Amino acid sequence: MNDAVYLNFGDIVATIILLGLMAAIVFLFFKVIQAIKRDAKKAKERLEKERENTILLQKHLDDLNERVKILEMKLKDLNP
């Protein structure tokens, strides 16, 4: 029996290309996942800032409403 090992360079090149493509796909997959996580974190931070701004604006609005009520009461007292 003749046990000879033949190297087919076409198969070797195809295997290298295939493994390279698979590695590139896995690398891109992890980069996309990282980008999605980073964007979600930024969105969460923006939402928190918007909530803080909303609370501040509500406080200012409440303060202005209180001032308007005081002015209305003073105007009522001036005009009987």
Image (cartoon, rainbow, N blue to C red):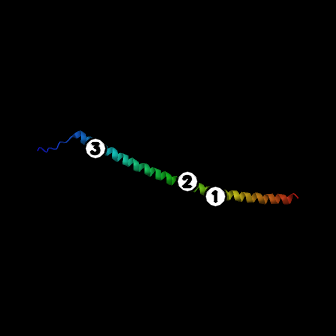
Query: Is 60 or 34 nearer to us in this picture?
Result: 34
Would you identify the image quadrant in which residue 11 lies? top left
Q: According to the image, label 2 marks what residue? A: 46
Q: Quadrant of the C terminus?
A: bottom right
Residue 72: horizontal and vertical position, in percent? 80, 57
Q: Label 1: few (<14), some or many (≥20) within 10 Å?
A: few
Q: Is residue 64 above or below residue 32?
A: below
Residue at 55 percent of width and 53 percent of height? 46
Query: Is 55 or 78 nearer to us in this picture?
Result: 55
Which residue type carries mark 1? Ile
Residue at 47 percent of width and 50 percent of height? 36
Q: Are marks 1 and 3 in contact (CB under 8 Å)?
A: no
Horizontal relation, residue 19 to residue 38: left or right: left
Q: According to the image, label 1 marks what residue? A: 55
Is tag 1's residue or tag 2's residue first in the polypeptide sequence? 2
Residue at 74 percent of width and 60 percent of height? 66
Residue 79: horizontal and vertical position, in percent? 87, 57
Could you tell me how far apart the alpha carbons at marks 1 and 3 are, in whole angstroms?
59 Å
Q: Label 3: few (<14), some or many (≥20) within 10 Å?
A: few
Mark 3: secondary structure: helix
Could you tell me how far apart the alpha carbons at marks 1 and 2 are, in whole angstroms?
14 Å
- The label nearer to you, 2 versus 3, is 3
Q: According to the image, label 3 marks what residue? A: 16
Q: Is residue 76 above or below residue 15?
A: below
Residue at 75 percent of width and 59 percent of height? 67
Mark 1: secondary structure: helix
